Image (cartoon, helix red, strand yellow):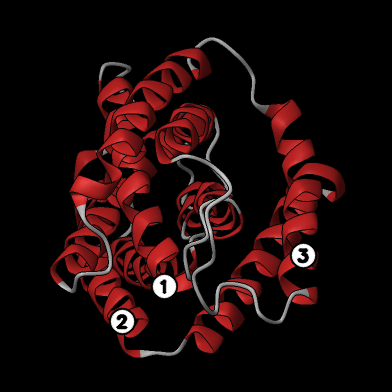
Amino acid sequence: MEFEFYYYVIFLGAGFLAGFVDSIAGGGGIITVPIMMASGMPPHMALATNKLQSSFGSFTASVNFIRKGLVSLREVYLGIIFTFIGAFIGAKVILYLDANVLNKIIPFMLILIFLYTLLNPHFGRVGKKSRFSEPLFFLIFGLLLGFYDGFFGPGTGTFWTIALVTLMGLNLKKATATTKVMNFTSNIVSLGVFLFSGNVLFFVGILMGCGQIVGAFAGSSLVVKKEVTFIRGFFLFVVGVTIVKLVYDSWLK
């Protein structure tokens, strides 16, 4: 599939912006998928290519967070295993089922998350006591959110962050870092499944991936340097924009 030259410039810029936003608060897909579809790319092709380009960003952010000591693979290996399994099943299922029902339900779930975060000014400021054992938490949410990201996707990072803060007691910085490791896991597994469907546009995906690398490095470095208040504000902004976008696409369009 060929595009006008200016679209390739737009793809590169969208990858950078999405990588930056996604590494801080998730939601990069609300930037990249609409832009790809606006170029005339079929929806199934846009979703598959999005997994390729977003894998670059989630990998870069994960490596940066690991290097800076915000997350350790030894601490989250169970999450990686169960997310891998869930994402594989979800990506397989989406090849046969329609995700429109989820598309209409998810905005309301995000509204609840937005209100909870907004009305809880101390959200994620300091770590708290975990309400779940680590193996049980990663078993449940690795399978559940891995499946969701493989099957549908929007808001996955938001759901991970909320779960890690409220149920595992992590502060918002550590939760954001852990979220990116889980995001990369489900992204790369879903991509592996979609590759066999023949819907991935490699040049576009790799071009956007280059932008993702730069954006994700900048965004994840900002998380390390900034206070939780900044991350919380950015998180609320991205969740709010995601809600508006999904409500428009699902109910008003």
Q: On the image, which quarter does residue 125 sit in?
A: bottom right
Residue count near mark 2 (Cα–Cα under 10 Å), binned few <14, some 14–19, many ≥20: some
Q: CA distance from mark 2 to mark 3?
A: 24 Å
The spot of residue 74 in percent (x, y) is 19, 46
Q: Image point 86% across, 50% down: which residue?
A: 252
Residue displayed at 55% across by 33% down: 152
* Outermost residue to the top: 96
Residue drawn 22% across and 54% down?
59
Name the disc covering residue 173, or none.
1
Q: Is residue 190 left or right of residue 203?
A: right
The residue type indicated by label 2 comes to Val
Q: Under tag 2, what secondary structure?
A: helix
Tag 3 and tag 1, C-beta contact below 8 Å:
no
Q: Quadrant of residue 207?
A: bottom left
List the residue tagged with mark 2: 224
Q: Answer with mark 3 or mark 1, whichever residue precedes in sequence.
A: 3
Would residue 1 be seen by someone viewing this image from the given angle? no
